[in-house]
Image (tube, rainbow, N blue to C red):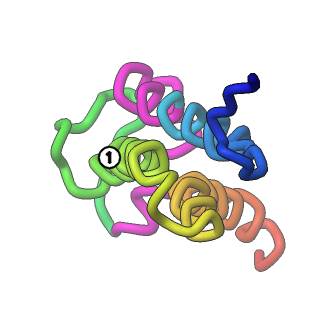
Amino acid sequence: MIVSLYEGRRYESYLFLQLSGVANIVFALAVLFAWPIVGYVLAEPLSLATESNFDRHTRPDLFDYPFVVFWWAPLVAAQLAWSSRHTLPRVLLQFVVIYPLSLITASVLWYHFGRTIWS
């Protein structure tokens, strides 16, 4: 007698969701606890995008608007992907889990490389 947890269904690997969730959590923790290091890359694009003044050497308040997006959005995306992986469609979960990091990466790359192209 063979006991199967999948009851005849095909096994679905969630490796992409797991790795993306871990990447989101690591990024959020790096922003929270290592802002002077991470701020060297993120402070100027954040200041330009939100029209606020951020210093890369001092950590902003935890719940300041632009700063909260850098740690809150990745944590929420990782939690949402983990908690609803059996209820939401897989493509939607992949979008939710990759969106915060892709948006932050695109804005930083646009700031650093877009200025040199248009200058």
Quadrant the N terminus occupies: top right
Chain part drawn in magenta: 27-50
Residue at 62% from the left image edge and 60% from the top image edge: 94
**Where does residue 107 sit, x and y in percent of width and height?**
59, 64
**Where does residue 115 sit, x and y in percent of width and height?**
71, 69
From where the camera sits, is residue 43 visible? no
Residue at 36% from the left image edge and 39% from the top image edge: 55
Give the side of residue 3 with respect to residue 65, left or right: right
Location of residue 12 with respect to 36 vertically, above or below: below
Location of residue 62 with respect to 119 vertically, above or below: above
Secondary structure mostly seen in magenta is: helix
Location of residue 30 with respect to 106 vertically, above or below: above
Q: How many marks?
A: 1
Q: Disc 1 marks which residue?
A: 72
Quadrant of residue 118 within the rendered picture: bottom right
Label 1 crowd (10 A; few <14 / some 14-19 / many >=20): some
| Kind of residue at badge 1 | Trp
> Farthest residue toward the front?
1
Location of residue 114 with respect to 28 vertically, above or below: below
- The one of 7 and 105 positioned closer to us in this rendering: 7
From where the camera sits, is residue 100 visible? yes
Quadrant the C terminus occupies: bottom right
